[in-house]
Image: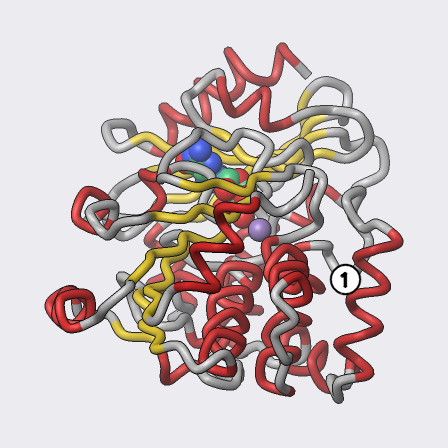
Amino acid sequence: MKIPEEMSKAIEEAQSVVLFTHVHPDGDALGSLLGFAAILEGMQKKVFCYLEEPVPHLYNFLPGRDRVNTTLDELFSFVEESEKVIAISLDCGDSRRLGKHETRLLEVKPFLVIDHHQSHKDFGDYRWVDPRKSSTGEMVFEIAQNLQAPISYEAAYNLYVAISTDTGSFCYEATSPRTLRIAAELVELGVQPDEVSGKIYNNYTSERIRLMEMVLGTLRLYKKGKVAMIHVTQDMFAKSKARPEDIEGFVDFPRSIRGVKVAAFVKENKDSVISVSLRAKGSCDVAELARVFNGGGHRNAAGFRFADKTLEQVQQLVVDQLIPLV
Ligand code: 5GP
Ligand code: MN
């Protein structure tokens, strides 16, 4: 699918842009946000990057992270003071994932949506949604090229983080020849893959490893080893002194077990919401499985959540209702 004409036009004509992404942002969310911000500033536009929470410490190496503003009042002052303003939501498959101020954010018009989630639920005024794209970072690169906008080193670095994290370091199915060509162009612009992957993967705290030890200790296998489940509790966070974002990537361990088709990671969050991450290997579609509990995501990475259940209750639901479908 090509970039919709009216979207390119809206971006070209805008003088000011507010950028949004999903809550609990990952590498693709932050990389496409900061990468696009740098590109739009290079096009002489004023940019406001809004996030509900500060940038997670795992990503505090991203160039331009100081652009992020978490103050809603300042966001709306920016919008009021701006002429020809547009909003762009990046990597958000569902308007609910814009966070607790969803309704207010959606008031900024026109509202553009750029996303690659298979389970995307339409929102906003102009949309470019393509589930075959590896990452939102890849889509932002395509837009920059389409508009003949220069890509600075800062933009290239952020887009490389977006693309390399969302493809699992260029391993997942959606990694296309075009993805690799774009990555090559970003490397030509000065990005050093060894430096970036060192920041992403060799930059963990010892608290994270302590927590990992506890979480891996919860591993259980179901359906003759086709399903693997792990969990984390608030108690484990307290004992390990790890931070909420330190669990990123844990679900890849149960997934890596030979014979496992689906890995589930059940998480007890601080706000007592229980969220579940699903990962698939091979042909299983976990976005479809997540729909059983009103969740969504991609074919091989999806999730859902409950606000009114305990960890044990959610695990039981997974065992009773989801695992039989694998
Ligand atoms: P993660 O497991 O990394 O949190 O999420 C993997 C994918 O599943 C993400 O692309 C995300 O969009 C999707 N996802 C995770 N949790 C939810 C959820 O509660 N609802 C929906 N609709 N999608 C989710
Ligand atoms: Mn993404």
User: Measured from the top left, where is residue 314 in percent x and y?
Assistant: 40, 26
Which residue occupies the foreground of this view, 217 or 310?
A: 310
Residue at 23% from the left image edge and 52% from the top image edge: 108
Placement of the N terminus among the 4 image quadrants: top right
Residue at 48% from the left image edge and 16% from the top image edge: 292
281 relative position to 1: left or right: right
User: Measured from the top left, where is residue 237 in percent x and y?
Assistant: 38, 60
Position of 282 relative to 250 (above/below): above
Q: Quadrant of residue 240?
A: bottom left
Placement of the C terminus among the 4 image quadrants: top right
Query: Can you identify the residue that label 1 sits on?
Result: 169
Position of 318 relative to 91 (above/below): above
84 relative position to 8: left or right: left
Mark 1 burial class by Cα count in 10 Å: few <14, some 14-19, many 20+: few
Give the colour scheme shown. secondary structure
Q: Quadrant of residue 294?
A: top left
Which residue occupies the foreground of this view, 42 or 233?
A: 42
Answer yes or no: disc 1 within 8 Å of ligand 2.
no
Secondary structure under badge 1?
loop
The amino acid on which the numbered mark 1 sits, given as a three-letter code, is Ser
Q: Quadrant of residue 325?
A: top right
Residue 261 in sight here: yes
Which residue occupies the foreground of this view, 81 or 262?
A: 81
User: Measured from the top left, where is residue 201 in percent x and y?
Assistant: 67, 73
Residue 266 in sight here: no
